[in-house]
Amino acid sequence: MVTTTDTTEIVTQPKTAEENQPSFKRWLKHVLYMPATKRYFSKHDQAAIAQAVTEAEHGHVGEIQVVIEGHLPVNQAYFQNTHMRARQLFAELGVWDTEYNSGVLLYINLCERKVEIIIDRGIKMATEQIIWDEICQNMVAQLAQQQFQQAVINGMMGIGQVLNQFYARSINDKSNELGNDPVILG
């Protein structure tokens, strides 16, 4: 039997506490969604986003991975919402596996027009949720105005500012553990 005290925390508790309701409506929405990721984000836009990631990562050890997905995979859309998908990609892409626990995943789902930011445990302890929510809300507002590239670039700049405040400049890390190019999924 595991007991918790004031100084311990059961890591798996949030996973079991978060339940997602299966949704036929969500599944149908993603099945009928026409792939448009390439239409919204051209090669030029992707290069601009990669440059924004490079600039946002400059001066600290934070690592940022951008994932832009047109729709949830059809075989997962019934049971999985965008937050669960972002957490899955955070694990699959190894964003959690940075040397200083400094990974940030910026996930954009075009079908639902939702933005999720998943942060690693090293950053989570020093920042507040409201900061990340504000970045997401600003991006969603720009996505609604069809400013796709600018939404991602502004989101990158916001994340970069938060990471600049969090990480001490005394850490000299020149490595780039995660690629700067956005990951584009269906």
Image (cartoon, rainbow, N blue to C red):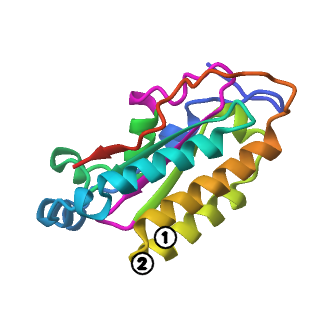
Residue 112, image x and y in percent? 33, 66
Density class for disc 1 (Cα within 10 Å; few <14, some 14-19, many ≥20) is many
Q: Is residue 23 above or below residue 122?
A: below
Q: Residue at x 83, y 33 (%)?
A: 6
Identify the element where label 1 is drawn: helix
178 vs 105, nearest the viewer: 178
Residue 96 lies in magenta, yes or no?
Answer: yes
Query: Which residue is identified by label 1?
Result: 140
| Residue 81 visible within the image | no
Query: Which residue is identified by label 2?
Result: 144
Identify the element where label 2 is drawn: helix
152 vs 144, nearest the viewer: 152
Q: Residue at x 43, y 73 (%)?
A: 147
The range drawn in magenta is: 91-113
- Circles 1 and 2, Cβ within 8 Å, touching? The answer is yes
Alpha carbon separation for disc pair 1 and 2: 6 Å
Residue 17, image x and y in percent? 52, 45
Q: Residue at x 21, y 68 (%)?
A: 25
Residue 63 lies in magenta, yes or no?
Answer: no
